[in-house]
Each structure stands twice: as C-alpha cells, then as structure tokens.
Amino acid sequence: MTIKSFAVLYLGRSNQVKLRKGSEMTEHRMGDSWREKIRGFTLIEILIASLIFVTVAVMAVAAFASAKKSNDQSSDMRVINECNHQIGDLLRAKVQGADIEKRIYGLIKTDTDTYKLEKPSSLRDGKNYTGLAVFESSNQFTPIFKQDGAYFYTDNPIEMNPDPIFAYNFTPVRLGSQDCQTYVSQSVPGAAIVKDKPFLVKQINYFTVSGVPGDEQDKIYSINLRDAIYRARDTQMVIEDEQGSHEKGIYSILDINVVNSVRPL
C-alpha cells in the first residue's frame, strides 16, 4: 500500500467517526427536547385544577338545589291556596243559604268521635266549635267540621234527630279537590287560633217577623273560621312540622268571616 492510499483510507475512516459522533450528538439533543415536551403536571398544578373543579361542582349543585326548593315551595303554596279557597267557598255558600228558622248549630265532638248539636251562645264573645251544622231545611243539615287536622263535610244532608243529646256519626268527605287530598290544616304557632275548635260562632242579632213566635225569630250569626293550611309530606298523611313550616312561610292563613243571610221579606 502506497503512502497516498494509506492517507486516503485514514481520512475516510476519520470522517466516518466524525459523522457518527455528530449523529449521536444530534440524537441526544433531540431526545432532550422530546422529553421536555412530554413533561407531566406538577402536584401543585393538579391540586389547583382539582380545587377549581370542586368549586364549580359545588356551585352548580347549590344552584340546582336552590332552584328545586323554590319550585317546590311555589307548588306547595299554589295548591295550599287552592285548598284554602275551596274551604272558604263551601262555607260561604252553605252559611248564606241556610234555612229560615234553624240556620246554624255548633258541632261538639265527643270522646267517641261522634258529634252533638248545640245552639250557638247569645253571648257577645260567642263560642268556638269543632264544626257547624248548617240547616238546608227545618230538619236537615250539612255538617262542616275539622277532624284530625283536615276539613270534612257530607255529600248528603243529615236528618236531625229529635233527641237534643243525640250523637251523630258522619261518613265524611274530605273537603277539597283531588290535589288537596294530601293537604291538612293546623295552627300557626303563637297565633290566636283555637287548634281543634276553629269555628267561632256569634249570635249578633234577631230579625223580628210579625206573627212569628219569639223563639223562631230569624237568628243572625257571625261565623269566623281562622286556621292555617299546611302540606302533608307522606302517604300516612303525617303533618309537616308546624314550626318549620311557619319559619319557611309555607302555609296559608284561612281567615273567613261570613254572616248567614237574612230571611226575605
């Protein structure tokens, strides 16, 4: 091998070594750059992201719960007020259309869940009763009364028994539409309401008719029914907590004043 050939061979190998080293250096730089690009999140970044997610989730759940509560309260008040009006409408219609001679009697509940009739007191302050016997004729009446927190009446008039101490056992119908069947009545805490005897009856006047005996004069009565309507929350008709309903304002005051109509001349 000549000196010239040896030099060419040496230089060629030297260049190959340089190229190989340059390629390794290039691969090394590219590896460092790739590893920098795929670097994961730090623990602090993960914690901050988690905190933001939890905060947004809590705010969304709170907003949904508030909207649902407001919707439930609106629904409660709508049906409670409907029940309130139905009780008032029936009472006004019956009282104002009462019979000429025996307009209104009070209903007194006995220990055996039966009821007795009583002529309303002529005292100025009147008397509270569990319900009313509203006469549609001289010997037939429709009872309207409160029992176990709800209001009832009968579809058909009841025949009056001649015995003044006779105890009546009614087959009542819950007062109100189907939507009102799960709504019951109780007292507002601290209010001037007689819980079990909400009907206040006052005899306020006599209307004297010529030729009619004194004890058969038209008797004018003032009827005041004051109570509060709450919603029952289960199929057992368990009454919602009174104090809680009062604090939340989810109730409707039933306040009715009606006077029986005067006999036509």
Image (cartoon, rainbow, N blue to C red):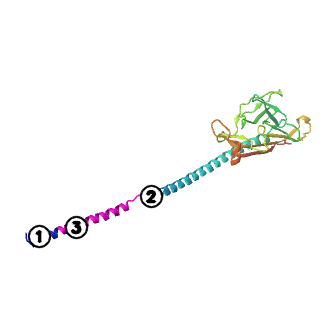
Q: Residue at x 75, y 33 (%)?
A: 157
Nearer the camera: disc 1 or disc 3:
1
- Cα distance between the residues tagged 1 and 2: 58 Å
- For the C terminus, the image quarter is top right
The residue under label 3 is 19
Left-right relation of 173 to 198: left
Give x and y (percent) for residue 81.
69, 46
Asked which quadrant contains residue 28, the reply is: bottom left
Give x and y (percent) for residue 66.
60, 51
The residue under label 2 is 42
In this view, 62 is above or below 134 = below
- For the N terminus, the image quarter is bottom left
Give the tally of numbered discs.
Answer: 3
* Helix, strand or loop under label 1: helix
Residue 24 is a magenta residue: yes
Q: Residue at x 19, y 67 (%)?
A: 16
Which label sits on residue 105? Answer: none
Residue 119 is a magenta residue: no
* Helix, strand or loop under label 2: loop
Left-right relation of 139 to 173: right
Residue 135 seen in the figure? no
Asked which quadrant contains residue 189, the reply is: top right
Q: State the residue lying farthest toward the left.
A: 1
In this view, 248 is above or below 175 = below
Give x and y (percent) for residue 211.
92, 36
What's under tag 2, amino acid-wise?
Answer: Thr
Is the Cβ of the residue at disc 2 closer than 8 Å to that at disc 3? no
The overriding secondary structure of the stretch rendered in magenta is helix
Which stretch did the figure color magenta?
13-41
Which label sits on residue 6? Answer: 1
